[in-house]
Image (cartoon, helix red, strand yellow):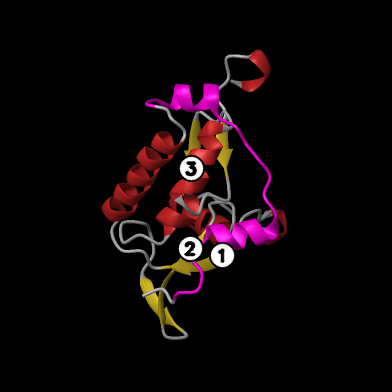
Amino acid sequence: RSAGFALPVIADGGIKTSGDVVKALAAGADSVMIGSLFAGCEEAPGSPVIRDGQKVKVVRGMASLGAAMARRLAEQEQDESAESQVDWDKVVPEGVEAVVPYRGHVQEIVYQLVGGLRSGLSYGGARTIKQLQEHAEFIEISAAGVRESNSHDVRRL
């Protein structure tokens, strides 16, 4: 909980693997936001396209210029008393439009994340997230240690 208050903490951003989920929860988060991983799923809005030989999905944040423009145009169509022109100078974009790798069905992503979370709990000697948070210990490792801890001297399939 946030600084002794009864406010839930949400880890928002940078979640790319189940290991990131485990670390965020171990550090005290009550939940995690998983945007880009799910954005590439079949069930997410948008159509898959091929870009540079890779299957990707075009995504746009809800505060991106494209999303804001679409909302304004839809509002204008619904409200017949609206001005004939949308004042685009008043649209303040915050999000981005981008492409993310296509990842298939969300069920498989969730299955992998849950499996990784279970594994992380096991590595942490915990049966619950609360136990993980109570006993988590973070250590700093060098860049060489990070490289060594990942797959090396082999070619991934």
> Would you name the residue on which mark 2 appears?
59
x, y percentage for residue 155? Answer: 43, 77
> Which type of secondary structure does the marked residue at label 1 adopt?
strand
Amino acid on which disc 2 is placed: Val
- Mark closest to the chain's N terminus, 1 or 3: 3
The numbered disc on residue 97 is 1
Residue at 41% x, 54% y: name it: 38
Q: From mark 1 to mark 3, how far is it between C-alphas? A: 24 Å
Q: From mark 2 to mark 3, how far is it between C-alphas? A: 22 Å
**Magenta region, residue range:** 127-154
x, y percentage for residue 33? Answer: 50, 42
Q: Magenta stretch: residue 142 in it?
A: yes
Packing grade of label 2 (10 A; few <14, some 14-19, many >=20) is many
Position of the N terminus by quadrant:
top right
x, y percentage for residue 104? Answer: 31, 63
Residue most extreme to the bottom: 53
Q: Locate residue 141 relative to residue 152 in the image: left or right.
A: right
Residue 106, placed above or below residue 97: above
Residue at 44% x, 56% y: name it: 37
- Disc 1 to disc 2: CB gap under 8 Å: yes
Please tell me which residue lies in front, 1 or 68.
Answer: 1
Amino acid on which disc 3 is placed: Val
